Image: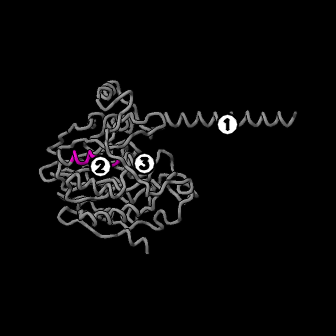
Amino acid sequence: MEIIFTILNIIKYLIYILLALAIVVFIFLTVSPAFGGTPDKETQKTIEDSQNFVEGKFQNIKTNYTNFRASEKKATFKDWFSPPKDKNPLKPLPTIKFNNKELTEGKFSWFGHSTLIMKTEDLVVMTDPVFNRASPLPSFNSNSKSSFFNGKPFEFENPILIDDLPKVDVVIISHDHYDHLDSKAIKDLSDLVDHFIVPLGVGAHLERWGVIKNKITELDWYESKNYKDIEFTFTPALHFSGRGVFNGNSTLWGSWVVRSKSLSAYFSGDGGYSETFKKLGDEYGPFDIAFIENGAYNVDWSNVHMYPDEAVQASIDLKAEILFPIHWSKFDLSIHPWDEPIIRITKEAAKKNVNLATPMIGEIFELNDIPKKPWWKKLRN
């Protein structure tokens, strides 16, 4: 009887501990600023009036495309928790020290993953600024071979800091996932950026992190904002959103068309392949350059993240002169080796005769002289 009583006591205290942990987690998920803000009544009314907002959530685009990936490797428990030693870079990635004074008219620079900067019509435009971690959790030491659960970036030979940036006129954001919307970076940029153009619902996050409301424009799909003679049009993507456990798809996601007198560019954000790329190419193309997601794919996510061959096809559909693969080389976000996306897309682009840009992180370049160096090969030696 005493043994049974002891076991019952242990179970009781375990339940208490689990309840306490659940309360702590709930408080963290609802109170931590990293999880963002809630739209005010006026913005919420705009959200609810959107034809893309159905039954309390934003809905994905409808597509007839079927992504069948029987030949691709399915993710296993071992892939996530015990990856091979060389899944991530074993030494700092070779990068070029970014010099903002060299970012003159018509030039670009990529900071890894989906963060890039461009100058057109004497304005500096930046996409999805992430300079810290792809996670809401504080940094911790992990003995795991994978940084997937830690959200930490790969090491760079020349880290790029917000202090290295020139004056930024416009920031555009594709969606509110942590690897595309960095709360700490937004806080640091809040007084340094003139205007933020974001999807419906994302403005509340920025306001919570210190950006004043009149510096934010929120758009629905196919809406545009003209800012000092540059046209920013928010276009669909096949993806999803959410920063917390309870707010999935409460904000919109998408891609961007950036048009000035001298530039026509496409920025994909995240998303699966669909016939929408052909529609966008017909309506807004051709494009001088298309920055297209290429990384963080696996079979289970094949409807919301493209494989490298699909990214190449998307650039063809968009009628892009140059394909620039983004969304790789900064974070460990799936089961594939860190350099697999660029290896695969390089082969596919050559096969389809697609003009592929492969600059180093931090390198400044222009469209009439795009870098094509296979710099990632250095880490295989």
**Residue 47 placement (x, y as % from top left):** 32, 29
Q: Which of the 4 image quarters holds residue 199? A: top left
Nearer-N-terminus badge (1/3)? 1
* Within-10-Å neighbours for mark 1: few <14, some 14–19, many 20+: few
Separation of marks 1 and 2 at Cα, in angstroms: 44 Å
- Amino acid type of disc 1? Ile
**Residue 71 placement (x, y as % from top left):** 43, 58
Q: Which residue is mark 3?
A: 301
* Within-10-Å neighbours for mark 3: few <14, some 14–19, many 20+: some
Nearer-N-terminus badge (1/2)? 1
Examine the structure image and report whether residue 276 is included in the region drawn in magenta: yes
Determine whether, in the image, residue 17 is placed left or right of residue 70.
right
Q: Which residue is mark 1?
A: 17
Q: Which residue is mark 2?
A: 268
Magenta-colored span: 272-280
Closer to us: 220 or 262: 220
- What residue is at 59 percent from the left and 35 percent from the top? 22
- What residue is at 78 percent from the left and 34 percent from the top? 9
- Amino acid type of disc 3? Trp
Nearer-N-terminus badge (2/3)? 2
